[in-house]
Image (tube, rainbow, N blue to C red):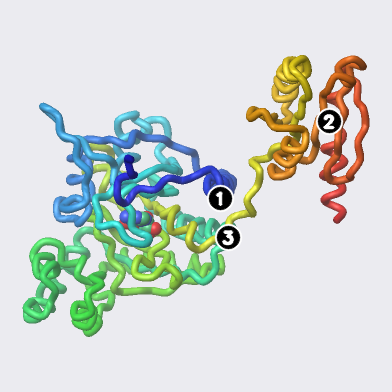
Amino acid sequence: MYKRVPGTRDILPEEVYSWQWIEEIARGILRNYAYQEIRTPVIEEASLFSRGLGEFAEIVQKQMFLIKNKEDTYALRPEGTASIVRAYIENNLDKIKKFSKFYYFGPMFRLERPQKGRLRQFHHIGAEAIGSIDPNIDIEVISLADTLLRSWGVNGYQIQINTLGCPEDKKKLVQLLEKELKDEAAALCQECQVRLNKNVLRILDCKNEACKQITAKLKLQDKHLCADCQEHFKEVRSGLDGLGVKYEVARHLVRGLDYYTRTVFEVKHGQLGAQDALGAGGRYDNLVEELGGPKVACVGFAFGVERLMLVTQPAAKTTGGLTAYLVTLGKEASREGRILLDQLRKNGIPCETDYEGRSLKGAMRAANELGVKLVLLLGEDELKKNVVMVKDMAAGSQEEVSRQELIEKLKEKLVQNSKRKDQN
Ligand code: AMP
């Protein structure tokens, strides 16, 4: 028997309702914030990521799913930002308008050791604002993330923010860290000893206890930041304060990817265990140019949907909105029922019937289990009279309705049903 690949999941219909709930809420809010959906391929040239995310980024070094053929090496995308920037450049979107806002949903792939909250195929809901250096857009993006979390009913999350500064400031920060950590090299974990020369920023968010103790002693202030970057960060903070977005400044917060500059942020949740990040993002003011496009500044974020699922209580399971269930008795009624079902569906009434040869009792039980509002009975008697027996499950009543009036009558009944529900 085949099994799914480790680190991947089947999302079965019952759970899909929760996914749709998360996505529908997100779509509504992203639309209110004027973001437009973009869909890019799940495979890209591998070098898009090594160039964009940085050759020494952990994702590039260890986690890429590579597909090699004779001439090219492709990668299953490990994240969305680089792909969206590629699409923005390739489709000349900057020529249409300088400033654009996108959102995306979709699977991402990282070759990691699977564990709770860490999968090899997982899903992002993300947003990217391309084309503005204005701190107002950093503020909008972080408050959008906050609004999404509230709307999904997530409680107990913390937003941490920091600034890495512009590329010159980042270089200063790297030098500062290399100098401060050089003497501690032997006490760092093996991975951080490598990072010391290649990706020193990443040492700041190493989970190893020894490394954490060493980096906690570093008195990271804003000495490496130029006046512009300090001002930018000040404005971001006061804008968030003005909107009532709660956050804390975490000087140790860095993101593992080369493209981040200035504002970075992460959303953490205590219920998630070791993999405690629900989502993360920040500014990337040089990526578009680095990948061959114009010099435009950007900011964005992504949430991990599987982790959101662990901290939300999506709306109660539903039947998928089924309204009616048709029960037919006898061959002739079954043939006529096919036509009736087709008419109902084409008129916007979601309905189902039995395909398993159930008895009347069995079919009624199936209708009950599906939680439908109406059961439609079609037997020899009804055929003769050209009517359908309509049972209203909530009211406990039934009536004969002529075939000509059936669709209108069912629509009326549904309106009455939903009014009754509102009153209760
Ligand atoms: P990142 O691009 O690593 O900042 O990821 C953004 C969000 O995606 C994280 O905060 C997680 O919620 C989620 N995420 C990242 N990697 C994984 C993974 N391997 N499995 C599940 N979710 C992930």
Q: SS for tag 1?
A: helix
Q: Please, is residue 206 above or below residue 118 in the view?
A: below
Residue at screen point 84% across, 46% down? 394
Question: Residue 410, which numbered label?
Answer: 2
Q: Which residue is mark 3?
A: 313
Q: Residue at x 65, y 47 (%)?
A: 318
Disc 3 residue type? Gln
The residue identified by callout 1 is 18
Q: Earlier in the sequence, mark 2 or mark 3?
A: 3
403, 218: nearer the viewer? 403
Q: CA distance from mark 2 to mark 3?
A: 33 Å
Q: Quadrant of the C terminus?
A: bottom right
Q: Is residue 383 above or below residue 308?
A: above
Amino acid type, mark 2: Leu
Q: Amino acid at mark 1?
A: Ser
Give x and y (percent) for residue 340.
Answer: 76, 20
Mark 2 crowdedness (10 Å alpha carbons): few <14, some 14-19, many ≥20: many
**SS for tag 3?**
loop
